[in-house]
């Protein structure tokens, strides 16, 4: 099953991220996919706001992963914001060890995560971003982890 949410503008995309943040738990990995400019980074900014990140979130394209300290009562102390667009091979993504890092009360959001989905295994939440005819964005959440969060995602997609 998948959950959809349409975002008419960038503010909507950010709010969609902020409202997804409440469904997240420590150890979660979220893979974001969609073309360049589809809204992945915008969405992460919203998630960051929802998790209580105070510093500015920018695209980690060149650093590959950037940790942000969080302040929330969900037991999530770090948001790991990764972007694997420029990786040359899967070993580089393996070296990031995101799967181990999230065990330390963190969550990871990975832009272009579908390029390395084999590394993350099945227990991930996926969000696909599509640009629609009116230049809005259609977000579709799915993946094995999403099935465990049905009621939260029902609320998320009802907006
Ligand atoms: N729902 C939306 N409707 C219209 N524009 C959007 C929407 N969401 C994001 N944008 C805009 O799209 C542009 C690219 O977004 P960005 O988040 O950097 O994409 P990506 O990280 O997928 O490359 C930004 O200018 C952002 O404001
Ligand atoms: Mg981006």
Image (cartoon, grey):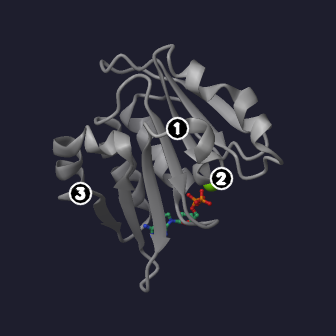
* Mark number displayed over residue 115: 2
At mark 2, the secondary structure is helix
Q: In terms of image quarters, where does ligand 2 lie?
A: bottom right
Tell me if residue 78 can be seen.
yes
In this rendering, the label closer to the viewer, 2 or 1: 1
77 with respect to 34 (left or right): left
How many numbered marks have been drawn onto this rendered protein structure? 3
Task: For ligand 2, tell me if the residue under mark 2 lies within 8 Å.
Answer: no
At mark 1, the secondary structure is loop
Task: For ligand 2, tell me if the residue under mark 1 lies within 8 Å.
Answer: no
Earlier-in-chain disc, 3 versus 1: 1
* Location of residue 119 (image quadrant): top right
* Location of residue 97 (image quadrant): top right
* Location of residue 100 (image quadrant): top right
Residue 28: x %, y % from top left: 43, 30
In this rendering, the label closer to the viewer, 3 or 1: 1
**Neighbourhood count class around disc 1 (C-alpha, 10 Å): few under 14, some 14–19, many 20 upward:** few
Residue 22: x %, y % from top left: 29, 35
To which residue does mark 1 refer? 121
Q: Residue at x 46, y 22 (%)?
A: 70
Residue 86, relative to residue 134: is it above or below? above
To which residue does mark 3 refer? 157
Residue 116: x %, y % from top left: 65, 46
């Amino acid at each position: 099953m998948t959950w959809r949410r349409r975002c008419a503008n960038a503010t909507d995309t950010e709010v969609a991220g902020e409202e997804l943040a409440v469904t997240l738990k420590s150890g979660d990995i979220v893979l974001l996919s969609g073309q360049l400019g589809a809204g992945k980074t915008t969405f992460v900014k919203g998630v960051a706001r929802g998790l209580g990140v105070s510093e500015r979130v920018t695209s980690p394209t060149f650093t590959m992963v950037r940790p942000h300290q969080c302040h929330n009562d969900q037991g999530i102390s770090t948001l790991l914001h990764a972007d694997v667009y420029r990786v040359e091979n899967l070993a580089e993504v393996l070296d990031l060890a995101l799967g181990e890092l999230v065990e330390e009360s963190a969550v990871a959001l990975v832009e272009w995560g579908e390029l390395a989905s084999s590394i993350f295994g099945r227990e991930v939440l996926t969000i696909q971003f599509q640009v629609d005819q009116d230049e809005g964005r259609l977000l579709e959440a799915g993946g094995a982890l999403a099935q465990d969060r049905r009621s939260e995602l029902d609320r998320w997609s009802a907006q």
